[in-house]
Amino acid sequence: MHSKSLYSRCELCERRCRVDRTAGRVGFCHSLDTMRVTRAALHFWEEPIISGTRGSGTIFFSGCSLGCVYCQNARISRSAVGEEYSPERLAEDMLRLERIGAHNINFVTPTHFAPGITEAIRLARHNGLSIPTVYNTGSYDTVDTVRSLEGLIDVYLPDLKYYRPESAEKLSYAKDYPLVARAAIAEMVRQRPEPVIEEGIMRSGVIVRVLLLPSHLAEAKLSVKYLYDTYGSNIYLSLMNQYTPMPGMTSPLDRKVTHAEYSELVDYAERIGVVNAFIQEDGTQSESFIPDFKL
């Protein structure tokens, strides 16, 4: 199916807005059928097996299907900003990032542009792209969308934001998020069932991020337990303490995660047997870690 046709009754995320994005209509993601990119550059603050020593070739898209109330990238996630990109231009940028040393090509918030991205990957590979591709998603993808990426995405980097529907509804307006995300992650693991790491860089596999939110320690533990019970050491976990409160947040989201909260999450993961995991040092809760979105 041609990529444009997938935008004509859009069901790429579980919102399933079914709007015709080719006719100038937008759904929850605020996006038409032309990709918009806000940043395409080397990025050094992903997990070590993603960023390595030379950086990840990170491509940020505007728009988002989740709209989390605490989003640190709200100025690009809630509007159609950035430059318009054709699949051909995106493929050229992927090859440029490889030339300047990127360990991989990292698509950030890609769900609502998945058809254009798959077309660009095919073009880039045809023209010599040899580094892995990374799908960096909030995990509100439909299983069909993830399935359409099979053979094109080497590394999946999804979030598991919530375990409880109540939290998902309150913070991302998506009560069904826990079930949707679990199904999407299951499809990712089916495609990339075991981690492959060469010279310190992941070439294939799944890394699931669990962002600890203030006063949500119990929920984060439930997510970690679910992931470990389900996938064991076939996936990596990334336990994140970098929540940065944006202006206007109310309690408890108006503060950073405490050292005690995060330490308890890490200790819990170790206690239940998690081995393949990344943890963050103190000091990551800063707006300096939010990229400057100037293309």
Image (cartoon, rainbow, N blue to C red):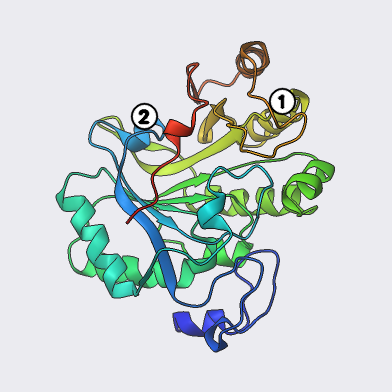
Q: Amino acid at mark 2?
A: Pro
Q: Quadrant of residue 252?
A: top right
Q: Which mark is residue 221?
A: 1
Identify the residue at image location x=66%, y=36%.
230
Q: Nearer the viewer, residue 13 or 215?
A: 215
Answer with the quarter of the image where residue 85 lies: bottom left
Q: Residue at x 61, y 38 (%)?
A: 246
Picture disc at residue 70: none
Picture quarter with the C terminus: bottom left
* Residue 147, image quadrant: bottom right
Q: Position of residue 212 (x, y in %)?
A: 64, 28
Q: Farthest bottom residue?
A: 23
The one of 123 and 235 positioned closer to us in this rendering: 123
Asked whether residue 148 is in view, the answer is no
The residue that disc 2 covers is 48
At which x and y percent is residue 292? 38, 45
